[in-house]
Image (cartoon, rainbow, N blue to C red):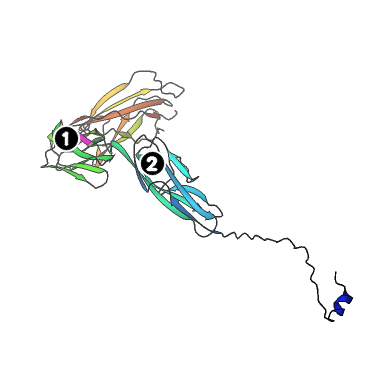
Amino acid sequence: METPSSLMASGGATRKLSVPHRASPAIEVTHTLDVQYPAKVRRVSQEVQQVIQGSSVSLECRADGNPPAAISWSRQHGHLPSGAQSEEGLSITLGDVDRHVEGTYICTASNGLGRPSSASMTIKVKYPPEIITEQAILHTGEGDEAKLVCIVHGRPTPTVTWTRGGHAINTDRHISSHDGLHHHALTVKHMKDDDFGDYTCTATSPLGRTNSSLRLTGLPQTPRLTSSPAGGEKSSFTLTWEAESYTPVIMYRLQYRKLNDNRVSQATGPWDIKLHSTGSTTGPAVAPMSSGPVQYMSHAITHLEPATDYEATVAVENTFGWSSDSQIFHFYTRKG
């Protein structure tokens, strides 16, 4: 081994020796970059789904976003079938569907960044025809115009026909119309006596057939009593009522009876029934006053007991026949 003195003796040059050191371990540093961005929703289910009435249907969405997004469901123009305004979850399932669940459903994703993201899906339900009648019985008069209306629903859209007695309608004076949605009408111009009767609205589609009956009648409508129950007299009471009739009321039937003391509708005796002609110039009958088809009438019942409860009903007659009896009306006389 060379020594410093030997190095110098060999030429006087100086060499620096490098003594290797032990290597230090490598240091690795990992940085995680958390990039946040707004939610973006996408449909998983079809945009439009047609399902058969009574089946079930599911709607599903997925969302991408950081932080993770929450998804909520709502319904365009109304509440969800459950009655809730909104529900949370990746999907909703509607069971035993009918036409009332039809509509557009919206899934909305939000994670607090930017604007919420939404996607919509539409459900259409196939179902047999259904008919709703605005007025099953339409009161009218000769010479007037009458309109019978059926509200028809169904998918596929049903075909609607009108018949009377199983026969097609005479189109000379009977006009069938449709508003393009669900409203189907049959208009009769200048009513004649033979136009009164029953008509049938029939709706047909590949899924079924249904019908509804409507009646055109000249009978007066059921009277409505308008008196105050509290009588101002001890032994008499004046009943007033109104009835819609397109021909003059020619007679009315009044019946009344006394109630027991505890004012429940349990009579103490039989009905006292009277028939009165509106054309009579004597007695308690008063000639009716009218405003359009509504006729106003009154009758003074006499020989009543003071401080006593009674009940009464009224029916009216025109040239086509009798109306139904009015609802039972309760009244009482003044104390003596």
Q: Say whether residue 151 is visible.
A: yes
**Image quarter in which the N terminus is found:** bottom right
Is 147 rendered above or below residue 262? below
- Left/right of residue 187 with respect to residue 270 in the rendered view: left
Measuring from the top left, give residue 298's x and y in whole percent: 30, 34
**Residue found at the far bottom of this picture:** 12
Which residue is tagged 1? 163
- Left/right of residue 277 with respect to residue 169 in the rendered view: right
Which of 236/78 is in front?
78
SS assignment for the magenta stretch, majority: strand
Q: Earlier in the sequence, mark 2 or mark 1?
A: 2
Which residue is tagged 2? 101
Q: Which residue sits at x=29%, y=23%?
A: 273
**Residue found at the far right of this picture:** 5
Q: Which amino acid lies under the numbered mark 1 shown in the image of this protein?
A: Thr
Tell me the quarter of the picture where residue 210 sits: top left
Q: Say whether residue 287 is visible.
A: no
Provide the residue span drawn in magenta. 195-203
Is 158 rendered above or below residue 15? above
